[in-house]
Amino acid sequence: MTNPIEVQGLVKSFGSVRALDGLDLEVSRGEIHGFLGPNGSGKSTTIRVLLGLLRANGGSVRLLGGDPWAQAADLHRRLAYVPGELALWPNLTGGQVIDLLGRLRGGIDERRRADLIDMFELDPSKKGRTYSKGNRQKVALVAALASDVELLLLDEPTTGLDPLMEAVFRRCVDEFRDSGRSVLLSSHILAEVEELCDRVSIIRAGRRVETGSLADLRHLTRTTVRSETVRPPTALTGMAGVHDLAIDGNRAAFEVDTAELDPVLGVLREAGIRTLGATPPTLEELFLRHYGDTLPDRPGAES
Amino acid sequence: MTGTWTLVRHFLRRDRWMLLWWSLGIALLYWSQAVSVEAVYASQAELDRAAALMGSNAAFVAMAGPARALNTVGGQVTWQATAFGAVAIGLMSMFLVVRHTRAEEESGRDELLRASAIGRRATTAATVVVVALANLLVGLLVTLSLVSFPLAVGDSAALGIGLAATGLVFAGTALLAAQLTSGARAAYGLTGVVIGTAYVLRAIGDVGTPVLTWLSPIGWYQGMHAFSGVRWWPLLLLVALAAVAVAAALAVFARRDHGSGVVADRPGPARAGALLGTPLGLAWRLQRGAVWGWAAGLFLTGLSYGSLGTDVGDLLGDSAMSQEMFVPSGMSLVDGFYATAILMLALMSSGFAISSALRPRHDELDGRVEVLLATGLSRTRWLLTQVVLTTLASTAVLLLGGLGLGVGYWLTADDGGAVGRYLLATLPHVAPVLVLAGLTTLAYGVRARWAGLAWLGLVLALVVMLFGTVFRMPEWLQDLSPFHHLALVPAEDFRWAPLLALAAVAVALTAAGIVGFTRRDVEVR
């Protein structure tokens, strides 16, 4: 079985601006794939190429085994799309838009529609122009989640949702994946990606800079360690993989490349561990490492 | 009112190109009439002769205005330019006002502005200032261009100042409409209806029922009688009406909530009806308001033309000159008038056809097409549906105009056969209307942003129709107007060839547009 999304060397230019510059992306069946990148890095452009709204200038793009440009309509019956901000027709109600999009996709699951409207606490009888941003987003989410499809393309789908609704959203997407279907979730909300995604791809300036499972990626990150030992752990100085080392008598605080964690712990044990605190790396740190070479000071890091 | 002047500067900066083109365009409309009259008529005798012909043609009078002093350059300028100049400045004012008020409010940008340290009424006040400046600029350019020609200063000033005041009346109307409606589109629609009504009222008034002319601001403007014994008191009517409209708008503004109209938005159905599930149903649902509005407008316009009945003939008299003008082509006076009236209805329908064909552009640039095309709906099917709706609705709108004309004639002249006759005479005009719609679709298919250029096609057709013969435009230029090719039924015998050719052109343009759309990127603003 082929992957639902296979992108290789994708290039898309707008005039002289190269929005996508040889992008690779694979999403496998049954996974939620996080698509991370800062604003303007090309996430939405990629999704719009996947939807056949934009024509690729180069590279190969396969969506659900087909060509998204040539077979757009057929492929679209098997997927649902949630844009970052759904523009609604000012004089159609949310309920009408949900039905419309569902029918154009080839049918809507009535029970699911009712449940989702309930869960998201959406008033479907309001006119498009009177919805708040979060409510517009709910319309898009209900329309997408109420359809029976194999793939969800979500472009920063939780913009404007309150935390309660975000939780509902996560539950729904989780269930969707658990039934063996796939999700591409573009986001810059790291907590969301960390909680939901099985694998992530990080893109920057139209190229993928990192991809893998969260566990894989954590190998690329640093663990923050604070220790108190019987003797000063002087052997840490100059050790491979240890960064920002601060030794204050018997206490030490430093960051260590996660791959080097074992030898470093060996050194600490030899110095006689009294207390040890280790903070596992977050995606945020990983993310920041790719977009800025310095991490901002984290509260409490220096104490 | 804090911040008004900052906003005025900001608006002027945003609008500078729009203001430049509109004001130059309108000034050119006036000035070019003077130049053309000088160029076309070699001697006063020739102008006298032409003036007698034009003034005795009720169709021309209905289109342009009361025929006064047509054997002078100033009289010709006044006659040819004022009605269209007034409509043009009305449209300019409407776009300026709604763009800075209701459209901004709808987009949410106004909220951002109002949250800053500006007075509550600052945006409205700044809009009034900017639109007043724009109208004065146009008035000034018109006056100066005519004075430089040279024409008499006092009369030129009457044309310019009267035009500015007429523009202000429509600006006030637009400002009021922007308060009453809760969407920019509705505000444009409402103002457009007022401008159209003002034009039609004076048309009917000038040809038959003088009292109607005095219900129209355009009639007041023309009632200033520039270049034929200018009088200034109608200017007071214009200024007073403009002031009343602005005051009413401010009063409503003071009472309503931000973002709402006067009528609160009611909840709608929570489920889509069966109709809305299909692309054509959606297209109809989104355009039905405009379709009903234009259909009613065209029907009433046709009805007013038709209700002149055979009076047209009396009005024209049996002057040998009129006969001479029409007999060679075998036209009777009445038929000639109605053939031209039908052409006028067709041009109005083109306004609907182009705006309807531009709907895909709005939906695309506003980002609404994206979600539609992300479903099982293919690009071809979506655009084809839009084309089908535009075609059907434009045809219906035009035919309703023809029906109105026939019914009006029937009621007045007690000639039931007229209904079928005029309806049949209207039918072929569907083709040139659809050529303009096809042109719009083609421009849209190439690039969504460019689609608005299709309005130039209608402008060209209007210019050719109004001034083509009078100013002896080169034949190739007149041929560019799709309306120039059809036989003027009922005055001339119907011919199949031009109709079929136009239909073929319309199909080709539309098909090219659809193919273009399937090959390009979907755009967003």
Image (cartoon, coloured by chain):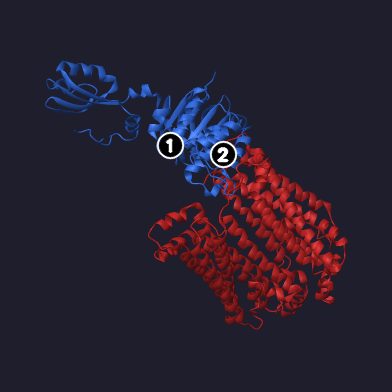
Chain colours: A blue, B red
Residue A51 seen in the current view: no
On residue A164, the disc is 1
Give percent across and percent down for residue A141. 52, 36
Which residue is found at the position 58% from the left and 82% from the top?
B154
Residue B159 seen in the current view: yes
Question: Within the image, what quadrant is residue B89 found in?
Answer: bottom right
Q: Which of B336 and B233 is in front in this view?
A: B233
Label 2 environment density (alpha carbons within 10 Å; few <14, some 14–19, many ≥20): many
Instruction: Give amino acid for label 1.
Output: Leu
Q: Which of B408 and B259 is in front in this view?
A: B259
Which residue is found at the position 43% from the left and 24% from the top?
A198
Can you identify the residue that label 2 sits on?
A: B371
Dot 1: what SS?
A: helix
Question: Within the image, what quadrant is residue B62 found in?
Answer: bottom right
Question: Within the image, what quadrant is residue A51 found in?
Answer: top right
Q: Which of A191 and B484 is in front in this view?
A: A191
Considering only vertical position in the picture, is B51 above or below B518? below
Chain at tag 1: A
Give percent across and percent down for residue B339. 80, 63
Q: Quadrant of the N terminus of chain B?
A: bottom left
Label 1 environment density (alpha carbons within 10 Å; few <14, some 14–19, many ≥20): few
Instruction: Give amino acid for label 2.
Output: Val
User: Gap between marks 2 and 1, in whole Å?
Assistant: 26 Å
* Horizontal relation, residue A5 to residue A216: left or right: right
Q: Which of A108 and A264 is in front in this view?
A: A108
Chain at tag 2: B
Disc count in the image?
A: 2
* CB contact under 8 Å: marks 2 and 1: no
Give percent across and percent down for residue B246. 53, 69
* Horizontal relation, residue B17 to residue B325: left or right: left
Which residue is found at the position 61% from the left and 71% from the top?
B31
* Horizontal relation, residue B286 to residue B137: left or right: right
